[in-house]
Amino acid sequence: MSTSASRFRSGLTGLLLSAPLLVPGSGGECPGHDYPSRGDSAQGREIVMVPNGAVTDAGWALARLNDGANLNNQSFTYPETSNPVRLFLIDSGIAAADTWFSRNPNLVIEHSELVRASGDPTYSNAVEHGSRMLSLIAGPETGAALGTPVHLVSLNIYPGDEGSTTTSGRMIDAIDRVIEYQALHEDMPGVICLASGSSTPGKNSAQLESIISEARDAGITVIVCAGNQGGDAAEYVPSAYGVQDGVICVGASDADNQHLANTNQGPAVDLYAPGQQVRTLNLPTPESGSYYLMNGTSPATALATAAAIIELSKNPGLSPQEVENALTADAFTVSQNALIQVHPDPEVDSDGDGCIDLLETFFGTNPADPAATPEPLVLSRTGNQLRLEFEMAADLFVPGTPFTLSNGSTWKIRCSENLQDWTEADGSLSTGAASGAKLPVTFTLPASAKSCFLQVEVSPAP
């Protein structure tokens, strides 16, 4: 993640008080001054910038992927990455491919096939589970990887009608086909999503373990669900194979960042993702704004798969182990849960309101709502004392470490007499009583200069 800082500025000149809003971006300054461009191109350091997208009313689960510490956020900002990633969805079939899923121009249905054992029917009406997994990965309104080119290869291992079961044998056959397919199509990295598992403990499968290892060794990242028995994930398959490097076993967390009541746990579980009342598409006829709420480690696995796809789109050369390391390093840890996080570029302005997402989060406004922007900073002078007053997000403030936020970001107050030379301000910080989601903050410092500018500088977590 970028380590650049973003700033919100207020200025005072003589007895004239002003609180101009800093327009974020390279070389942004207070309005009313003519400054030369400080873009990087003049120094030959042009940086490629990409847009990000946002879902204003995304529900708690997607929103929690952006900010694990914020229990109130309902908006989700997804990065728009450019490198395609192949999704191998080993599940039921897919419904509404030509209607609902076609609304995402980044989703390409590349290939689909039935995986059948001897004596299986040659058809399948089972589509609900696989469709809901795809909707959480790349579906309109509910997908976490909406801004990433995803090429779907669907392998249907559920024969017969809706609600049918499958076997480890069909799963083994499907993974074998994935390995062969990827070997013939090496144009993009691949991720396997396995959101199915055994319901009784003690049924280990050496052949399934071996084929998962083979897929991992072929450079395919494998995501498996922990299971919903409320026990030890190591006692079930394929969750037991989460102990392998590059095989990511996903448990489910609830809206309070605790373990979901029935999620399997234990050393085999690598990461957690939201699994309570998660919005998915509503079948049989998906409609905008209408959702089916899903519980368990299946939706958690789909969201984790989306995070892995985004990571691979950013860095296509990552090995499965490196994907796991990246997701683990970026996780938000709380109550023994390492929660998957999906971070857009901190300099992005999702809603185009002139204030970047990093600052909107700090000041407690919705980065996906163009009508919600931070209030201007209020700067006043009494004698030789300056007072800077503003409101910030109450859930980010940590009294014991006030300049390090609960999401790992840091902030400081900096001052200048000329808008060119800036130093960190030495003053005292005080807070008032929180009102709703906002906390009033006052920073006081001595200053004798006739002109003074103060700015709040926020740096993302490293």
Image (cartoon, rainbow, N blue to C red):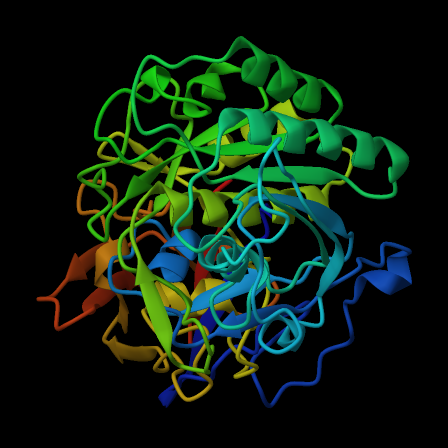
Q: Is 193 on the left-hand or right-hand side of 237?
A: right
Q: Measuring 38% from the left and 84% from the top, which residue is drawn there?
A: 372
Is 307 above or below relative to 17?
above
Q: Nearer the viewer, residue 118 or 192?
A: 118
Q: Measuring 19% from the left and 66% from the top, which residue is drawn there?
A: 439
Q: Residue furthest top?
A: 206
Q: Quadrant of residue 400?
A: top left
Q: Measuring 38% from the left and 61% from the top, which residue is drawn there?
A: 63
Q: Nearer the viewer, residue 216 or 347?
A: 216
Q: Measuring 19% from the left and 50% from the top, which residue is drawn there?
A: 256
Residue 409 in view of the camera: no
Whole-percent x and y of residue 273? 38, 44
Q: Nearer the viewer, residue 135 or 376?
A: 135
Q: Nearer the viewer, residue 286 or 23?
A: 286
Q: Is 288 on the left-hand or right-hand side of 389?
A: right
Q: Residue furthest front?
A: 119
